[in-house]
């Protein structure tokens, strides 16, 4: 009996984990439409990454930066048309206009190589990265950065939801195992 419950529990765990195959994987190799580091305005797109090589040499971040300190910011101008117009980058601490303070500002200029980059020091808190492209139709892209902050919503999505699913399935299995129908079925099989 215990072996059957253990086997059923293993199957339930596999069924719950199946929808989350890339939960621990980074976004590398993802399509542009699915990449969380890409922002679109119409047909035009930019890709943002932040690096902190003093902590982890190859790690890249786009919305949650785990530590404070010197941070390298890189914007890839995915749309080739953006390479022919002035593009600027501004980092603002705070997410509303009353408390906002500009931390770094790279004035719009041409970037024929398609890369806008710079370095700044980020303290703990929320930041907005604002990328502007000045042209006939000005474009504005924004990223919200969380520096050295816990993302409780992400924790709930990755831990609590599957855990609740497992508990509900365990309850269902328990009810099934304790049901008279299953007991009578099991007795009929054994005889």
Image: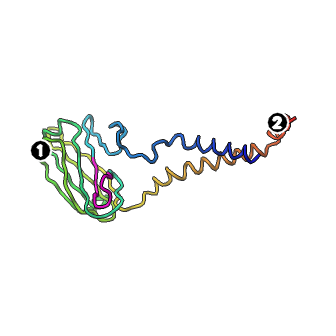
At 82% across and 36% down in the image, what residue appears? Answer: 185
Can you say whether 136 is above or below 156 in the image? Answer: above
Q: Which residues are magenta?
A: 48-60
**111 left or right, relative to 50:** left
**Which mark identifies residue 8?**
none
Q: Quadrant of the C terminus?
A: top right
At 69% across and 46% down in the image, what residue appears? Answer: 6
Asked whether 183 falls inside the magenta stretch, the response is: no
How many dots with numbers? 2
In the depicted view, which residue is nearer to us: 85 or 116? 116
- Res 140 visible: yes
Q: Quadrant of the N terminus?
A: top right
The rendered magenta stretch, by its main secondary structure, is classed as loop
Q: Which residue is mark 2?
A: 185
In the depicted view, which residue is nearer to us: 72 or 122? 72
In the depicted view, which residue is nearer to us: 101 or 24? 24
> How far across and how far down the image is residue 115, in percent?
19, 45
**64 left or right, relative to 47:** right
At 27% across and 36% down in the image, what residue appears? Answer: 42
Q: CA distance from mark 1 to mark 2?
A: 75 Å
Q: Please name the colour scheme applied to the rendered image.
A: rainbow
Q: Earlier in the sequence, mark 1 or mark 2?
A: 1
Can you say whether 158 is above or below 35 in the image? Answer: below
- What is the crowding at mark 1: few (fewer than 14 residues within 10 Å), some, or many (at least 20)? some
- Res 102 visible: no
> How far across and how far down the image is residue 68, in percent?
31, 64
Can you say whether 43 is above or below 144 in the image? Answer: above
> Considering the numbered disc 1 on the image, is that residue within a helix, a strand or a loop?
loop
- What is the crowding at mark 2: few (fewer than 14 residues within 10 Å), some, or many (at least 20)? few
> How far across and how far down the image is residue 190, in percent?
84, 36
> Considering the numbered disc 2 on the image, is that residue within a helix, a strand or a loop?
helix
**Which mark identifies residue 110?**
1
């Amino acid at each position: 009996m215990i072996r059957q419950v253990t086997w059923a529990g293993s199957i339930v765990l596999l069924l719950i984990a199946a929808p989350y195959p890339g939960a621990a994987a980074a976004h590398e190799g993802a399509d542009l439409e699915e990449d969380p580091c890409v922002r679109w305005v119409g047909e035009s797109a930019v890709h943002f990454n932040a690096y902190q090589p003093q902590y982890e040499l190859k790690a890249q971040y786009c919305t949650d930066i785990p530590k404070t300190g010197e941070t390298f910011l890189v914007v890839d101008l995915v749309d080739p048309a953006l390479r022919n117009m002035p593009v600027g980058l501004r980092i603002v601490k705070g997410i509303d206009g009353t408390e906002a303070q500009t931390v770094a500002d790279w004035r719009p200029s041409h970037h024929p190589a398609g890369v806008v980059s710079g370095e700044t020091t980020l303290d703990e808190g929320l930041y907005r990265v604002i990328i502007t492209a000045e042209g006939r139709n000005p474009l504005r892209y924004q990223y919200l950065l969380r520096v050295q902050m816990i993302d409780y919503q992400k924790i709930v999505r990755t831990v609590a939801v599957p855990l609740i699913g497992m508990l509900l399935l365990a309850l269902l299995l328990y009810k099934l195992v304790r049901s008279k129908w299953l007991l009578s079925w099991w007795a009929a099989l054994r005889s």
